[in-house]
């Protein structure tokens, strides 16, 4: 097991550049490497700006809450790995509880991590990609830094599986953000953004999906409103100065007419699976478009829309774009004179 963990860690050496250090988080008994930590917070506290925190599979998959107060990169192995072929052969998924991007966390990122509760963002240029999340909350810090209060602006939230909502609190947050290629599977919505792009998402909901948006672009999204009432509206009345174009709404006329929007599409024809939301446990790849999906030609130039379309398509199980061991085979024996023969297969999800 120690050799296996070592191989796993070595595959991420390509992430390092001169000043970076990989801080491994793994609570498997017997690991004595000084760069291995039992919790994500321990790894963060030992890190310097620019370091990488790597969450690895281990006996206890919960690595606790994490408060980020320096520029770091957090990388996991994805989520729901049993649902997706050619992912890590070790399907145990490391998880975090709440994650807080606080003062001085600007330019930090989190990728391929299952976050059991909230991600709180209080600083700028935070990137949240390929994660499984319950709720994302953007706000202004309550602590002054260099004479001002840091604010959650220029935040990138893309390629995530989101159970609930992305919410901005306050007039000075949520500017110039990117919300793209996410799957909102629990009736979630997007609230309070300004001058931001909200595109190529999929929403399963019977409530409005866009609230209090000012000067935004809302395009190439799929709203599956199969359970909504006949009077359903996808865009709330408090949305101002926002372009709503080239979106598709199933079952009812929930979108503004014109601008390439398509209303009342047959829900059963849109996705690879007739009703992906009814499958338990949920499988994200079921939200891929069917061969004859009406969503394949709704975008500008008759292009596809939704989470699996566009320039940064959703990646099933959030597998990060780093080397992934998909197969590990050894001879099962070896000693000081007879080497242990090991064969591994590796791939990367880009």
Image (cartoon, rainbow, N blue to C red):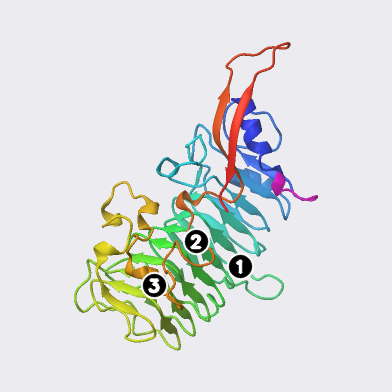
For marks 2 and 1 on the same chain, the one whose residue lies earlier in the sequence? 1
Q: Label 3: few (<14), some or many (≥20) within 10 Å?
A: some
Residue at image coords 51%, 80%: 194
> Does residue 90 show up magenta in the picture?
no
Residue 169 visible in the shown view: no
Q: Is residue 194 above or below residue 328?
A: below
- Name the dominant secondary structure of the magenta segment: loop
Q: Which stretch appears magenta?
A: 14-19
Q: Check disc 2 and report its element: helix, strand or loop.
A: loop
Residue 151, image x, y percentages = 59, 72
Question: How far separated are the C-alphas under marks 2 and 1?
Answer: 26 Å
Question: How far separated are the C-alphas under marks 2 and 3?
Answer: 16 Å
The residue carrying mark 1 is 123
In front of the other: label 3 or label 1? 3
The residue carrying mark 3 is 297
In front of the other: label 2 or label 1? 2
The residue carrying mark 2 is 313
Seen from the viewer's position, the closer of residues 156 and 220 is 220
User: Does 259 sit left or right of 231 as displayed?
Assistant: right
Q: Residue furthest left?
A: 230
Residue at image coords 38%, 68%: 296
Task: Assign the C terminus to one quadrant of the image.
Answer: bottom right
């Amino acid at each position: 097991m120690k050799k296996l963990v070592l191989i796993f860690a070595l595959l991420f050496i390509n992430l390092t550049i001169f000043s970076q250090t990989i801080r491994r988080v793994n609570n498997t008994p017997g690991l004595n490497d000084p760069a291995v930590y039992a919790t994500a917070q321990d790894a963060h506290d030992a890190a310097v700006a620019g370091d990488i925190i790597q969450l690895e599979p281990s006996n206890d998959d919960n690595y606790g809450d994490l408060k980020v107060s320096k520029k770091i990169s957090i990388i996991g192995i994805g989520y729901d790995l049993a649902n997706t072929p050619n992912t890590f052969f070790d399907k145990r998924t490391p998880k975090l509880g709440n994650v807080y991007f606080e003062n001085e966390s600007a330019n930090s990122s989190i990728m391929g991590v299952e976050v059991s509760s909230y991600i709180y963002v209080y600083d700028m240029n935070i990137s949240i990609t390929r994660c499984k999340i319950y709720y994302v909350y953007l706000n202004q810090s309550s602590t002054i830094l260099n004479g001002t209060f840091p604010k959650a602006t220029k935040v990138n939230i893309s390629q995530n599986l989101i159970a609930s909502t992305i919410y901005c609190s306050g007039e000075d947050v949520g500017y110039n953000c990117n919300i793209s290629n996410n799957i909102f599977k629990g009736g979630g919505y997007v609230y309070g953004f300004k001058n931001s792009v909200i595109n190529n998402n999929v929403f399963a909901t019977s409530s409005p999906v866009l609230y209090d948006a000012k000067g935004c672009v809302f395009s190439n999204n799929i709203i599956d409103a199969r359970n909504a009432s006949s009077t359903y509206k996808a865009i709330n009345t408090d949305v101002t100065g926002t372009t709503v174009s080239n979106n598709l709404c199933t079952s009812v006329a929930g979108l503004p007419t014109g601008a390439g929007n398509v209303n009342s599409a047959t829900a059963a024809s849109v996705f690879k699976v007739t009703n992906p939301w009814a499958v338990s446990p949920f499988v994200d790849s079921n939200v891929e478009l069917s061969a004859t999906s009406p969503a394949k030609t709704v975008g500008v130039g008759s292009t596809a829309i939704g989470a699996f379309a566009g320039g940064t398509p959703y990646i099933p199980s959030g597998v990060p774009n780093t080397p992934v061991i998909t197969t590990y085979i050894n001879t099962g024996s070896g000693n000081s004179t007879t080497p242990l023969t090991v064969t591994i297969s590796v791939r990367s999800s880009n």
